[in-house]
Image (cartoon, grey):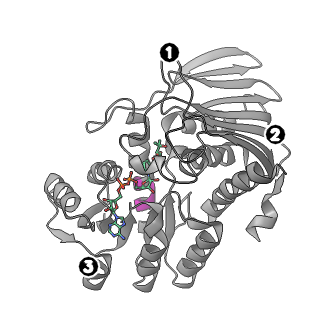
Amino acid sequence: MSNLRGALIGCGFFAVNQMHAWRDVAGATITAICDRDAERLKSVGDQFGIERRYGDASDLFKDGGFDFVDIATTVASHRTLVEMAAKHTIPVICQKPFAPTLADAKAMVSICQDAHIPLMIHENFRWQTPIQAVRKILDTGTIGKPFWGRFSFRSGYDVFSGQPYLAEGRRFIIEDLGIHTLDIARYILGDVRRLSARTKRVNGAIQGEDVATILLDHENGVTSVVDVSYATKLPTDPFPETLIELDATEGSLRLAQGYRLQINGPLGSEVLDVSPRLLSWASHPWHNIQESVLAIQQHWTDHLLVGTEPSTSGADNLKTFALVEAAYQSAECGQTIDIRALLK
Ligand code: NAD
Ligand code: 89V
């Protein structure tokens, strides 16, 4: 099997997970890294034994010698870095949120299409073991056709200590976390035609909203609710679990806290343990996310090697990103937003 060489840009909080996962991916190896922060560059370079280190992404691209780039910086730099990759015809993975605005995201997809390079957004939540388990149950047809769903992420976990920038933006939970939950809703129930949303800020120490409730009309007529909160105090915090309820024509399904998947079919009920694996480099409670990082990076590598489109390609992710944009618009104006109009 050929081995792809990758370069990673952005050696911060989350990139350490990506670097660990790259070590476990079959068919790809990170051979160069870049960060404008010299300390972070040194720390990741030393930890993972990477000799080729760059403080400036344009020098990295100028030197080349890699088959894809993994952009793990925060959103402000994504468009510039994706444009650099396109200019050098280097296939690119870009972290979520893909772009600051939907207009930027559309432009980035076009630029990569014009350069004939694959673009995948690192939208890893759909790759979590419990989410994949829900998808598989639906595909068996045991519970029939869903007509209603709920995708819920409610926590009081302190995300700000590891990611202080999350407290500083005008937008918070929909852009950072709801983007994953909306993507899961699309992955499980299909694309969305309209949505309406309400938001709140409960934590006075941050700038953006930390609670959002979003009502979705899917293209296939299914109704669902996406509700997310970082202001919810519970005796056992479920971070970072997404809980799912689906009611369907022949039964129902409940993905409950503790990675317990209850399936209620015509012949009775059963409860499955759909816990993620604890990889050697992972730790509780992040292990669910960490395992999905390995899964998405393996998926990218497998698709790049054979030249097929990854599940969360740039074009696919525009349909998730539009839901983020629509949710903010709806929360501001109190109206229902037409997704097809946004995607035009
Ligand atoms: P961070 O601030 O800890 O790290 C970002 C790093 O990028 C910093 O070291 C910074 O110096 C570097 N950087 C920024 N612009 C650069 C540029 N132009 N050239 C070179 N280096 C540059 O951020 P983080 O918490 O690691 O988050 C990074 C991204 O990952 C964000 O978009 C965030 O939303 C996303 N994230 C995703 C998940 C997930 O599960 N998918 C989880 C956490 C964070
Ligand atoms: O997954 C993420 O994007 C993270 C967190 C789980 C903290 O929201 O930023």
Q: Amino acid at mark 1?
A: Pro
Q: Which residue is rendered at x = 26% and y = 81% of the image?
A: 59
Which of label 2 and label 1 is nearer to you? 1
Q: Earlier in the sequence, mark 2 or mark 3?
A: 3
Q: Which quadrant would the N terminus be assigned to in this image? A: bottom left
Q: Which residue is rendered at x = 57% and y = 54% of the image?
A: 170
Q: Please give the label number shown on residue 65.
A: 3
Relative to 25, residue 243 above or below: above
Relative to 142, residue 197 above or below: below
The one of 185 and 335 positioned closer to us in this rendering: 335
Which of label 2 and label 3 is nearer to you? 2
Name which quarter of the figure residue 161 lies in.
Answer: top left
Residue 44: x and y in percent read 21, 56
Magenta stretch in the rendered image: 297-301
Q: Main secondary structure of the magenta part?
A: helix
Q: Amino acid at mark 3?
A: Gly
Secondary structure of the residue carrying tag 3 is loop
Q: Which residue is mark 2?
A: 223
Q: Are marks 3 and 1 in contact (CB under 8 Å)?
A: no
Q: Which residue is mark 1?
A: 235
Picture quarter with ligand 1: bottom left
Q: Is residue 2 visible?
A: no
Relative to 217, residue 141 above or below: above
